[in-house]
Image: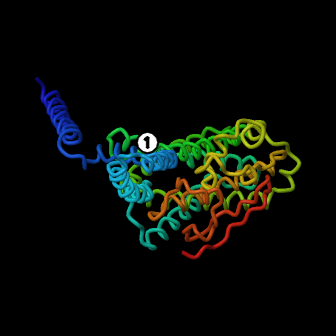
Amino acid sequence: MSSKNMIWTALFLVAGCNWGVTVTRAFCVTPTTPLRKAFTTDRRLEYQVGLSSRISRVERHRSWSASSSSSKSVTLHQGREDEAEPSLTQETKKPISPASEFGTPLPESASNFNKAAVGIIKNAVFDILFAGDSLDRSYARFYALETIARMPYFSYLSVLHLYETLGKWRRAEYMKIHFAESWNELHHLLIMEELGGNARFQDRFVAQHVAFGYYWFVVAAYLFNPILAYNLNEAVEEHAFETYENFVEQYGDTLEQLEAPQVAKDYYSEGDLYMFDAMHSHQTSSSSCESDLRRRPKCETLRDVFCNIRDDEAEHVRTMAISKKTDSDLLDSGDDLCEIIDDDITSETAVLDIVPNGSNATTMHEVVS
């Protein structure tokens, strides 16, 4: 047997032993291992979802026991249930998010470094490679921007799938939100491709290779500290918002004369809006949110399209600002999450004030931490 084959055999043996010990400990030794914790958490979440129906059954049981001749034993059983319910309910209200489970709060210096790094890369790379004031060069710049902007959400999904596979943590709703965000960035990319932003080989080459490296960088950052990854992407999305905002101000009159691409109309107004709604952090948590709180932008001209994309980037800033917090859950089932007040969001820079009923009025303002 060659030395190479011996090395591979040894690695497989070590990996097999490691997995055997992990599975044995998870199911046979102690209920406090990470794998058991994951399934215990799922059962607690299922309990929370069905809590109201269970409470009603307990109330009916109490009524029956009051008229029963053997009420003492039944009352004792109910008393035990009453004592157990508050502690379990309180435990399920604890924030369960990637930031709270695996994250470490960032010092202000790290957050400032992320912003500075994003600004340097933007000025030293994109402003040079995609220089020019024409619409074509702007479309090429946005094509590269959207190709790269999708990568963080792919990275989040990859790591969350890994955690679920290993039994360390499972919360499918977070994968849904991050996939909806990647779906949103995909349609930004499709719009830029329809406008001809990917016409030049060198533009595609730069965008795709930077995106490849950025994907793996964010995977490592998310594994190391999800808060770091969310904070970095928050800075990227802020720059994206400013880029689109400046573009609309500069070319707004010209864009007003051009019709919106069909792919934009399908995504924003005429098609299935389920994924569009799912990416909004202020309306994904409850299916009972009123329809007038949902964002319904108009999409008739190319200016409308770029205003919508700008607002989408601000929404990503909002979601990243909430996701990096360790003291709250983006998917809290409380009814108040149908409408989130900006003052409750910790963000060192900016968040979005969304005006319902399709208005394009958007503001980015400072929020004191």
Q: Is residue 182 placed above or below 92 in the rendered structure? A: above
Q: Position of residue 116 (x, y in %)?
A: 52, 68
Give the quarter of the figure containing the C terminus.
bottom right
Q: Residues within 10 Å of mark 1 (few under 14, many from 20)?
A: some
x, y percent for residue 115: 52, 66
Colour mapping used in the image = rainbow
Per the image, label 1 sits on a secondary structure element best described as helix
Residue 118: image x %, image y %?
Answer: 53, 61
For residue 83, what is the image quadrant?
A: bottom left
Q: Nearer the viewer, residue 293 or 110?
A: 293
Q: From the viewer's perspective, tell me whether residue 217 is left or right of residue 347.
A: left
Residue receiving disc 1 = 158
Q: Which quadrant is home to the N terminus?
A: top left
- Give the residue type at disc 1: Ser
* Picture residue at 58% right of the left edge, 76% below the top: 368
Residue at the far top in the pictured view? 1
Q: Residue at position x 16%, y 27% from top?
A: 5
Task: Count the marks.
Answer: 1
Residue for point 85% across, 42% down: 259
Rendering coords of residue 233 (x, y %): 52, 57
In the displayed image of the protein, which residue is found farthest to the bottom? 368
Residue 11 shows up from this direction: yes
Nearest the camera: 247 or 200?
247
* 229 sits to left or right of 83: right
Q: Nearer the viewer, residue 87 or 141?
A: 87
Q: Is residue 48 visible?
A: no
Quadrant of the rendered image containing residue 18: top left
